[in-house]
Image (spheres, coloured by chain):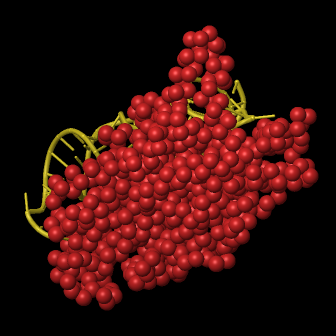
RNA sequence: GGCUCCAUAGUUCAACUGAAUAGAAUAUCAGAUUUCGGCUCUGAGGGUUGCAGGUUUGAAUCCUGCUGGAGUCACCA
């Protein structure tokens, strides 16, 4: 019995009664502040079905609605806009119906629907996580939570690129120059330690190239013949042959990296339900390619390489198997996708959180999977997002302009600490509670900053000034939440019974905002956009602050009104908390 | 060069996917509240929505062509 449905069906009914004409759709929107009313029906589109003066049609329809629909109390027409005034009773009934709900807006699990697998993060194991991964992780995690909130089962996953020549490079450098260093012996996080040796390899490699060139080699040959590179290639062959010592070293060093990543993930507050490793999946696609060849989806060239012709779909030809029979990136992704559906038979679709530089890759991947005839291939989505740029330009690891994820979180936490100490509302908090709080605020600022922007747009991140704590920011919203909690702590009277009062305009505005929360989640899910949730929450908070400024809550003399305002504040706080949980942001009781 | 994406107040972002005078925040200026947390609230100035056409009762939004930026077009991942 939501108000949209009521209006939709009754406008159609009214149109039929008045003009004897069927109206397929009704367009409406929230009424702008400067006009009277709550919901506005747009008359213009109706002119296609019934020629006439839009104002007159508006008047006729308005009259019909007020006479026939109890929720609609009054109306006015401005140009082609029919503004409807919704009754207090409707909003009060709505409030009573949601007041006891602890998870307002969150749908219960629809057991009849297929599950969705959301992939995100998928880092290179040679490099510690940086700002780009932060955006990826926050987006992936949040979209997974949002989809879950619409009632679907969700599996969070990632594919770990744990194999290949790049891994051998850091292994080799560690063997040669590491002197047996471990994360424990150095006190370094494992991913940082391994990352250092990856850099070390590159330095040595460059030195050798320079030496070879000095000895008279040309640059191209020098790059190919540098001894350290040859050694790395030899190591890869050993690894692929299953050489025990090489595999043991590989396992040990990867273990360090995973521990390091795990620390960063847990710090960031993201997690996974299931993991896939490239070393397990890189061969998976081959069988599929064989089957695809039989079906005629792929074809073999003279040199024995296998291709997929996508020119009919407006794309190019794409290689899926090298002439030596080995798998390429695409082969691996085909195999992994199929494996996932085998492992989790309830999965009916997947979301890939990967940067927009891979738009083309995923277009091709999805198309190939469709051609192979998998019914779930229609339910694949590439959650493509823009890069994070620094004022100095692109992040480049070699130039040291990478913003490290761990460092970033530490910095944000430190800033939060400075600000909280100035405010000084934390008497009675222990040191560890304070530290916990600083992290909630610091991370809240970072996450909100990243998530409030439409995913497909680029973000310019200025570490110095970008992350603010005022205005449209995470801490501003957290602050409002904390302030409501303060009011509730002080409201030491029984406020559990439901009351009927005449609504203040500000109360009505707040209720209007609450009404649209469930559909906002739905919209965020269909658009794969946490930004929609972020902006909704901000609007709700602004509306609350305006209410807070305009009416007195605890100072109200009318007992019923006082009760209602406490209840309403409480519901707003709960809604903030739920909305923020969809973004992976926590809210503090005090700050 | 082909294809894809992006361009909105000084700045950071919106605009419910085609509707009313394009909205917030921030910064600036002017005020309120001095009593539920002054990290609050109200107001002002600030825009030819990159440019030029087109479709439409109506365009930031759709189409075409430009300009500027990014990405991609590997038997790399």
Can you say which quadrant of the picture contains the C terminus of chain A?
bottom left
Q: Quadrant of residue A301?
A: top right
Residue A403 x, y percent position in the rendering: 41, 40
**Image position of A304 with respect to A584: above or below:** above
Residue A447 x, y percent position in the rendering: 41, 54
Whether residue A449 appears in this view of the structure is: no
Q: In this image, A563 relative to A236: left or right?
A: left
Chain letter, colour yellow: B
Q: Quadrant of residue A541?
A: bottom left
Q: Give me the residue at 46% from left, 52% from top.
A: A260
Residue A424 x, y percent position in the rendering: 15, 60
A9 or A494, which is in the foreground?
Answer: A494
Q: Give me the residue at 56% from left, 41% from top.
A: A171
Q: Give me the residue at 65% from left, 59% from top.
A: A350
**Image position of B51 with respect to B18: above or below:** above
Q: In this image, A162 relative to A545: left or right?
A: right
Residue A140 x, y percent position in the rendering: 53, 56
Q: Give me the residue at 22% from left, 74% from top.
A: A487
Chain letter, colour red: A
């Amino acid at each position: 019995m939501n108000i949209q449905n009521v209006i939709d069906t009754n406008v159609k009914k009214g149109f039929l009664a008045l003009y004897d004409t069927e109206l397929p759709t009704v367009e409406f929107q929230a009424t702008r502040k400067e006009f009277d009313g709550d919901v506005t029906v747009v008359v213009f589109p109706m002119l296609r079905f019934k020629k006439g003066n839009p104002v007159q049609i508006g008047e006729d329809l308005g009259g019909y609605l007020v006479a026939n629909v109890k929720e609609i109390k009054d109306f006015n027409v401005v140009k082609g806009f029919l503004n409807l005034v919704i009754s207090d009773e409707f909003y009060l009934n709505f409030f009573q119906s949601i007041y006891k709900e602890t998870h307002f807006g969150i749908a219960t699990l629809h057991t009849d629907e297929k599950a969705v697998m959301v992939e995100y993060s998928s880092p290179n194991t040679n490099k510690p996580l940086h700002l780009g991964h932060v955006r990826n992780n926050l987006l992936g995690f949040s979209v997974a939570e949002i989809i879950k909130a619409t009632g679907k089962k969700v599996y969070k996953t990632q594919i770990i690129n744990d194999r290949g020549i790049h891994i051998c490079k850091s292994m080799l450098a560690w063997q040669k120059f590491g002197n047996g260093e471990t994360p424990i012996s150095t006190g370094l996080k494992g991913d940082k330690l391994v990352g250092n040796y990856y850099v070390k390899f590159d330095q040595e490699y460059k030195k050798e190239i320079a030496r070879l060139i000095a000895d008279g080699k040309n640059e191209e040959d020098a790059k190919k013949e540098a001894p350290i590179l040859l050694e790395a290639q030899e190591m890869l062959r050993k690894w692929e042959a299953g050489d025990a010592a090489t595999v043991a070293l590989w396992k040990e060093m990867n273990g360090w990296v995973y521990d390091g990543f795990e620390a960063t993930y847990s710090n960031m507050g993201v997690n996974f339900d299931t993991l896939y490793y490239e070393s397990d999946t890189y061969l998976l696609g081959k069988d599929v390619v064989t089957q695809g060849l039989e079906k005629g989806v792929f074809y073999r060239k003279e040199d024995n390489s296998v291709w997929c012709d996508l020119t009919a779909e407006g794309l190019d030809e794409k290689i899926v198997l090298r002439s030596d029979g080995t798998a390429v990136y695409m082969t691996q992704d085909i195999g992994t996708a199929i494996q996932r559906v085998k492992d989790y038979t309830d999965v009916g679709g997947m979301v890939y959180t990967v940067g927009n530089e891979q738009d083309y890759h995923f277009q091709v991947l999805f198309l190939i999977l469709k051609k192979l005839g998998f019914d779930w291939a229609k339910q694949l989505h590439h959650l493509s997002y823009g890069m994070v740029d620094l004022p100095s330009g692109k992040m480049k690891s070699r130039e040291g302009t990478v913003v490290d994820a761990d460092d970033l979180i530490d910095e944000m936490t430190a800033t939060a600490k400075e600000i909280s100490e100035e405010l000084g509302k934390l008497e009675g908090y222990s040191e560890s509670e304070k530290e916990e709080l600083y992290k909630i605020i610091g991370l809240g600022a970072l996450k909100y900053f990243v998530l409030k922007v439409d995913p497909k747009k680029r973000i310019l991140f200025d570490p110095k000034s970008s992350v603010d704590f005022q205005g449209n920011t995470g801490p501003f919203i957290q602050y409002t939440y904390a302030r409501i909690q303060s009011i509730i702590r002080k409201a030491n009277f029984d406020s559990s019974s439901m009351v009927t009062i005449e609504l203040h305009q500000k109360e009505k505005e707040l209720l209007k905002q609450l009404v649209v929360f469930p559909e906002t989640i739905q919209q965020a899910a269909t658009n794969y956009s946490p930004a929609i949730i972020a902006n909704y929450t901000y609007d709700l908070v602004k509306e609350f602050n305006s209410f807070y400024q305009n009416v007195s809550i605890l100072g109200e003399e009318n007992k019923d009104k006082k009760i209602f305002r406490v209840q309403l504040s409480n519901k707003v706080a709960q809604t903030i908390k739920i909305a923020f949980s969809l973004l992976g942001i926590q809210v503090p009781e005090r700050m």
